[in-house]
C-alpha cells in the first residue's frame, strides 16, 4: 500500500519530469507531516554558551549536568540546538555536552575545505581540549560519520555509540529512489550545488523544515537560520552533500566510512540505533540490514519521523537514550 510519504515522493518526481520551473521550491509545500509528533515541543534553548579553542578557532558548545560524559553530535545543517529537548532527559545523571561542528552553529568559520576529514580533526581536537574521558557518543546525520571515526580510532575512550538517521556506511546510487538520486546529484554538482545550497540556502530554508515532519515555528527557524546569513557562511552546508560516499566517490570518504562500519560490526562497544517511521536514512529496510550486519546492536523505534526526528519525538528519544545509557554505565 502506498503511504503518504511515498505518494509525496511520486508527486515530486512527476513535477521534476514535466519540468516545472523551480520544482525544488515546491518540495516543502508537499512535504508530509507525521501523524504522532509530540505535542508542545519547546523552542527554548536555555543553555549557557561556552567556547573552547581548537586548532586556532572557537568551537561553541553547551553542557549540563554531572556524571559520565555524553557527547551529542549533530549533522547538516543543524547545530547543538537540535538537541535542546534531549538534553533535559539526560542531564540529571550525566554530563551532557552538545557542540556545534566547525563552521556550523555558533562555532567559528575558518577558511578550510569543510571535508569530512576536517570535521573529524576538529572534533578530535575538541575532545582533547576538554580532556573528555569515557565518552558515550550520540550521533545524528553527519555526526554519525564523525563520531564513529572517533570511536573506531579511540575505542578505549568510548563507552558506547548511539546513532539515529546517521551516516554509518558507504552508499550506492542503486539504493536510492529516483527523487533522492535526482536531488543529490544536483546537490553534488559544483555549480548546481552552489546555487541551490549557498545562494538559495535551500538546505536551511526548505530541506530542514521539509524533513522535520512538522511545521517548525518562527523561533525554531530563526535559530537554525542564524549561522548562515551569507553565501560564504553556507560553505560547510554546501560541502556536506559532496562528502557522502556513494559508489566509492569521494574515494577517501568511502574508505574511511567503510572501515569504520567494519569496526562497528566487530566491536564489543555497546551500540544503539534509534529509528522513526518512515525515516529517510534509517528506513525499515536499512535498519533490518543494520541488525543483520551487527547482531549485538540494540534497536529502538521512537514513533513517526522523517530525518530530523528530534523535532518530532524528543521525549521518546530521550527516554530510550536514558535507559540505554543506564544499561552501559
Image: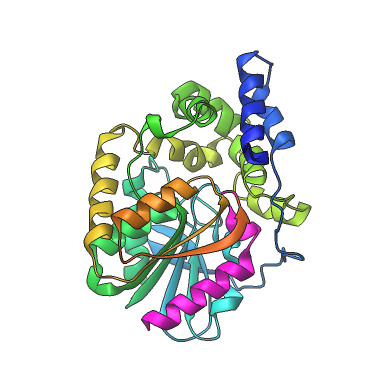
- Check the image and name the residue furthest to the top: 18
The residue drawn where x is 52% and y is 28% is 194
Relative image position of residue 311 (x, y in whole percent)? 64, 58
Residue 132, visible in the rendered structure: no
Q: Left of 203 or right of it: where is 293?
A: left
The image quadrant of residue 18 is top right
Quarter of the image with the N terminus in it: top right
The residue drawn where x is 48% and y is 46% is 281
Q: Nearer the viewer, residue 130 or 66?
A: 66
The residue drawn where x is 48% and y is 82% is 94
Q: Nearer the viewer, residue 143 or 181?
A: 181
Residue 95, visible in the rendered structure: yes
- Check the image and name the residue furthest to the front: 1
Relative image position of residue 238 (x, y in whole percent)? 49, 36
Bounds of the magenta segment: 306-329
Residue 93 drawn above or below residue 100: below
Relative image position of residue 201 (x, y in whole percent)? 62, 36
Q: How many marks?
A: 0
Residue 325 drawn above or below residue 251: below
The residue drawn where x is 42% and y is 47% is 286
Amino acid at each position: 500500500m502506498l503511504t503518504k510519504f511515498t505518494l509525496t515522493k511520486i508527486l515530486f518526481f512527476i513535477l521534476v519530469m514535466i519540468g516545472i520551473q523551480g520544482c525544488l521550491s515546491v518540495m516543502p509545500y508537499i512535504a508530509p507531516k507525521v501523524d504522532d509528533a509530540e505535542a508542545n515541543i519547546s523552542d527554548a534553548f536555555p543553555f549557557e554558551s561556552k567556547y573552547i579553542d581548537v586548532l586556532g578557532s572557537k568551537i561553541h558548545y553547551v553542557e549540563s549536568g554531572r556524571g559520565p560524559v555524553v557527547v551529542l553530535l549533530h549533522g547538516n545543517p543543524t547545530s547543538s540546538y537540535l538537541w535542546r529537548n534531549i538534553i533535559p532527559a539526560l542531564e540529571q545523571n550525566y554530563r551532557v555536552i552538545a557542540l556545534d561542528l566547525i563552521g556550523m552553529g555558533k562555532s567559528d568559520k575558518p577558511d578550510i575545505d569543510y571535508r569530512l576529514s576536517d570535521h573529524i580533526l576538529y572534533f578530535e581536537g575538541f575532545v582533547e581540549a576538554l580532556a573528555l574521558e569515557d565518552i558515550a557518543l550520540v550521533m545524528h546525520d553527519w555526526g554519525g560519520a564523525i563520531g564513529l571515526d572517533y570511536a573506531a580510532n579511540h575505542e578505549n575512550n568510548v563507552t558506547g555509540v548511539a546513532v539515529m538517521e546517521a551516516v554509518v556506511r558507504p552508499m550506492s546510487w542503486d539504493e536510492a529512489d529516483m527523487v533522492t538520486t535526482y536531488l543529490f546529484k544536483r546537490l553534488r554538482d559544483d555549480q548546481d550545488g552552489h546555487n541551490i545550497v549557498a545562494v538559495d540556502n535551500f538546505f536551511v530554508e526548505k530541506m530542514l523544515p521539509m524533513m522535520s515532519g512538522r511545521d517548525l515555528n518562527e523561533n525554531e527557524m530563526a535559530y537554525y537560520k542564524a549561522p548562515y546569513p551569507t553565501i560564504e557562511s553556507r560553505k560547510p552546508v554546501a560541502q556536506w552533500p559532496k562528502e557522502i560516499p556513494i559508489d566509492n566517490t569521494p574515494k577517501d570518504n568511502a574508505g574511511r566510512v567503510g572501515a569504520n562500519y567494519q569496526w562497528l560490526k566487530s566491536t564489543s562497544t555497546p551500540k544503539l540505533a534509534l529509528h522513526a517511521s518512515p525515516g529517510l536514512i534509517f528506513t525499515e529496510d536499512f535498519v533490518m540490514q543494520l541488525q543483520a550486519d551487527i547482531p549485538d546492536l540494540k534497536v529502538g523505534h521512537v514513533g513517526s519521523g522523517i530525518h530530523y526526528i528530534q523535532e518530532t519525538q524528543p521525549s521518546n528519544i530521550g527516554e530510550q537514550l536514558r535507559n540505554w545509557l543506564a544499561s552501559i554505565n
